Image (cartoon, grey):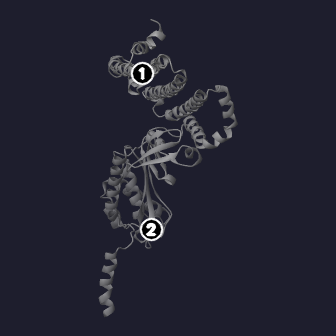
């Protein structure tokens, strides 16, 4: 039995009946063929889908490579089964509509469009599979692979849409490509942000400006957190309060931002904070003060050695010490600075191989800033804050031992206390 005889089997069967006209037999034959086509397609769909989802999934798990696992995850085999079913049905359309050649042409165009869409989805799934597989390698974990995939997908969609229009209109593909060239200026305007994003992605990758996992700060856009996605149009940052900030990719090369990767890769996280000391609490040390400070273990040797050096200098130059300002003297502020240096040197969480110092900054209306500059070994944010808080807790508690005072603006309670003291005196 040839194909035409098979396609007209029900027509022959029905037309032999006295109750059914030839025209009705033709339509009923086409309807029955169409129903059989749907049944065949449904059966093939279920069988192939089972093979793609169950059988191939089990086979992929047994293999050593993870590439096939990603193929299953991104449904490459599922889309391939859909393509196979569409191709089978497409080949059977001439048999179903053998007596309706005009309708056959339209139905074939619909199937051709569906096939083009499925091919695009297959290519997208393959690109996603390649991306997931490349993420397994350290050299690609922090690269913006999504940007390149989006560029390829844009090109594929443009080509796919052109092919679809060519298929629906029946005009040659070359004419559509020629017309597309005439609209290139319009396309450049429409895809301006996409083109800028693509260029920015390339520059970000080549210059190694930003990687996935980098902690960046971009105050202009309220971004302060870890980069978890870099695509063609935007960079997504998960801030430390778990909010998400989206920054246009192009702005990473046109605007300034701070990347903390250097800190993360270094031996420590910087501690740079000042204590404001009241200027009128700074004074020369008397003999009594010096004896008291010698009791502080960290600076005992320093105070003794420094005072001996001061005394020798004053004696050698016959300095009149009846006035304390004459000659060389130690100050409580200087002793406190040395104490901080020694305290940091023995602190277990401070990296001794990196810069470490205590310095006095220019006086301000709020007092004399005494800045501590050092690097914490632990770079994890929570641990770093605990270390820094512990250091300054100790230093703030140590200030009174040097007869120094911290500056702070008076509170309402302070003003109330002053008023309560001065009130009775004015009454007198």
The furthest residue to the front: 18
Q: Position of residue 190 (x, y in %)?
A: 61, 43
- Mark 2 lies on residue: 367
For the residues labelled 2 and 1, the Cα–Cα distance comes to 99 Å
Q: Is residue 53 visible?
A: yes
Q: Residues within 10 Å of mark 1 (few under 14, many from 20)?
A: some
Q: Position of residue 23 (x, y in %)?
A: 47, 21
> What label does residue 14 carry, if any?
none
Above or below: residue 409 compared with residue 291: below
Q: Nearer the viewer, residue 274 or 245?
A: 245
Q: Tell me the residue at 31%/93% (across/down).
A: 427
Q: Nearer the viewer, residue 94 or 309?
A: 94
Q: Is residue 329 left or right of residue 256?
A: left
Q: Position of residue 62 (x, y in %)?
A: 33, 17
- Mark 1 lies on residue: 28
Above or below: residue 420 compared with residue 176: below
């Amino acid at each position: 039995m040839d194909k035409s005889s098979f396609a007209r089997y029900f027509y022959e069967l029905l037309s032999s009946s006295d109750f059914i006209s030839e025209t009705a037999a033709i339509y009923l034959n086409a309807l029955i063929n169409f129903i059989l086509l749907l049944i065949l397609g449904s059966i093939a769909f279920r069988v192939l889908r089972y093979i793609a989802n169950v059988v191939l999934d089990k086979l992929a798990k047994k293999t050593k490579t993870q590439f096939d696992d990603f193929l299953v995850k991104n449904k490459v085999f599922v889309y391939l089964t859909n393509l196979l079913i569409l191709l089978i049905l497409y080949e059977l359309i001439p048999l179903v509509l053998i007596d309706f050649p005009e309708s056959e042409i339209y139905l074939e165009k619909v199937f051709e469009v569906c096939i083009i869409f499925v091919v695009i989805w297959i290519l997208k799934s393959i690109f996603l599979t390649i991306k997931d597989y490349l993420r397994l390698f350290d050299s690609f974990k922090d690269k913006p692979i999504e940007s390149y995939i989006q560029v390829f997908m844009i090109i594929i969609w443009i080509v796919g849409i052109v092919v679809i229009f060519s298929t629906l209109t029946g005009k040659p593909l070359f004419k559509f490509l020629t017309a597309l060239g005439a609209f290139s200026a319009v396309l450049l305007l429409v895809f301006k942000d996409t083109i800028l994003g693509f260029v920015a992605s390339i520059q970000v990758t080549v210059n190694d400006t930003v990687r996935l996992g980098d902690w960046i700060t971009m105050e202009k856009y309220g971004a302060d957190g870890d980069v978890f996605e870099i695509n063609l149009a935007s960079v997504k940052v998960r801030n430390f309060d778990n909010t998400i900030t989206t920054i246009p990719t192009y702005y990473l090369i046109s605007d300034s931002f701070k990347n903390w990767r250097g800190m993360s890769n270094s031996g420590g996280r910087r501690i740079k904070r000042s204590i404001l000391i009241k200027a009128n609490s700074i004074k020369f040390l008397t003999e009594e003060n010096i004896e008291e400070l010698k009791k502080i273990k960290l600076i005992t040797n320093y105070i003794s050695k420094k005072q001996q050096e001061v005394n020798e200098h004053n004696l050698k130059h016959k300095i009149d010490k009846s006035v304390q300002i004459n000659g060389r003297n130690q100050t409580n502020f200087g002793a406190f600075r040395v104490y901080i240096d020694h305290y940091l040197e023995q602190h277990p969480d401070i990296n001794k191989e990196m810069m470490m110092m205590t310095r006095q900054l220019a006086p301000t209306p709020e007092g004399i800033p005494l800045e501590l500059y050092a690097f914490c070994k632990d770079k994890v944010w929570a641990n770093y804050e605990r270390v820094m808080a512990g250091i300054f807790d100790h230093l703030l508690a140590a200030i009174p031992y040097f007869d120094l005072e911290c500056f702070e603006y008076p509170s309402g309670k302070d003003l109330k206390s002053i008023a309560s003291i001065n009130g009775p005196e004015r009454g007198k």
